[in-house]
Image: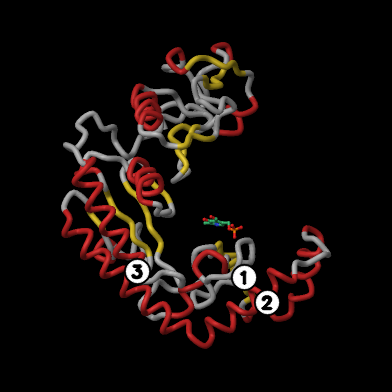
Amino acid sequence: MRVLVDEAHGTHLYFSDQLPISGMKAGADMSAVSLHKTGGSLTQSSLLLLGPAMRGDRGYVQQIINLTQTTSASYLLLSSLDITRRNLVLRGHATYQRVIDYADYARREINQIGGYDAFGDEKSDGDAFFAFDLCKLPVHTRAMGLSGVEIYDLLRDEYDIQIEFGDLHNFLAIMSVGDRPVAIERLIAALADIRRSFGCEPATDLVNEYIRPVVAMTPAEAFYAPSESLPLGECMGRIASESVMCYPPGIPILAPGERVTPEVLEYIRYAKEKGSKMTGTEDPAVEKLFVLLESSGNGSCDGI
Ligand SMILES: Cc1ncc(COP(=O)(O)O)c(C=O)c1O
């Protein structure tokens, strides 16, 4: 079996020993690296890296790529990849050391403001939180009473600062090759201002971050079973045949085959109220949900 790594956010891992291990170093056979994300090339340009074990298979990989991709390659994107590759080979180590230093500085300053928890490497345990990417700036916002989505929106609308994402309890800024000290200072100042102008008491009605799923049947069984679309309020206790996710992070609140519980409904209500982008349902407003017809039974793995 070949191991193919999704290393979309991993360009910089190849240019510092302080960063988590790269796909190739970990022994992957292939790795898809979105050079445009943290490397600085034009959007949509990326690389497929092949490890030493693939040496004899290059022709086969090319053949498969030819099946799915255009024969009219974009020379704009190819040139951008090549310029970025050259730049990283010559200056990558110094560049990412600077980025790591900026992110460390931002973390310290943001933690001085109060209300924000700009966490870092101290959280990694080599297990579920395997390692921390020092170029990322994730910030937990619960203590200041605003969701990550609200801070994301405020930064964009009031301060002209575009960050990566906000979810219910966190936001994420990514430091990369294009960042300069003035941008970091603007971000820190904007966060201090948001805390002063919009911060409030930590929400007490906040739902849990983790919902234990009540699995009634397999996702495939539920997805293909006869179903009906009902207003959310009428779905309590029924088995979902579609999923509901907040994006980001894109982890299902409810997956096909799971029972709709009061916690699930509360989480959906809260996420919508906080302005989270909801996906997964046929109804884009997530007012209605597809659930199994009651005659479709209770499923085979109730209580798992
Ligand atoms: C984990 C992960 N994999 C893959 C992709 C897609 O990468 P690209 O936009 O280069 O196709 C993304 C994009 O955000 C991503 O976050």
Determine the secondary structure under disc 2.
helix
Residue denoted by label 3: 134
Tell me the CA gap for discs 1 and 3. 24 Å
In the rendered structure, the answer to whether residue 166 lies left or right of residue 295 reads left
Give x and y (percent) for residue 110.
23, 59
Badge 3 density bin: few <14, some 14–19, many ≥20, Cα 10 Å:
many
| Horizontal and vertical percent position of residue 62 | 77, 70
Q: Residue at x 43, y 83 (%)?
A: 93
Crowding near pointer 1: few (<14 within 10 Å), some, many (20+)? Answer: many
Give whichever of discs 1 and 2 has the lower sequence position: 1
Q: Residue at x 40, y 48 (%)?
A: 156
Circles 1 and 2: CB atoms closer than 8 Å: yes
The colour scheme applied to this rendered structure is secondary structure
- Circle 1 residue: 30
Going from the N terminus, do you reach mark 1 or mark 3 first? 1
Q: Which mark is residue 80?
A: none
| Percent coordinates x, y for residue 276 in the rendering | 42, 36
Q: Which mark is drawn over residue 54? A: 2
Q: For the residue marked with disc 3, what is the amino acid?
A: Leu
User: Closer to the camera: disc 3 or disc 2?
Assistant: 3
Label 1 is placed on what type of residue? Met
Query: Residue 150 is drawn in which quadrant?
Result: top left
- Marks 3/2: CA–CA distance: 30 Å
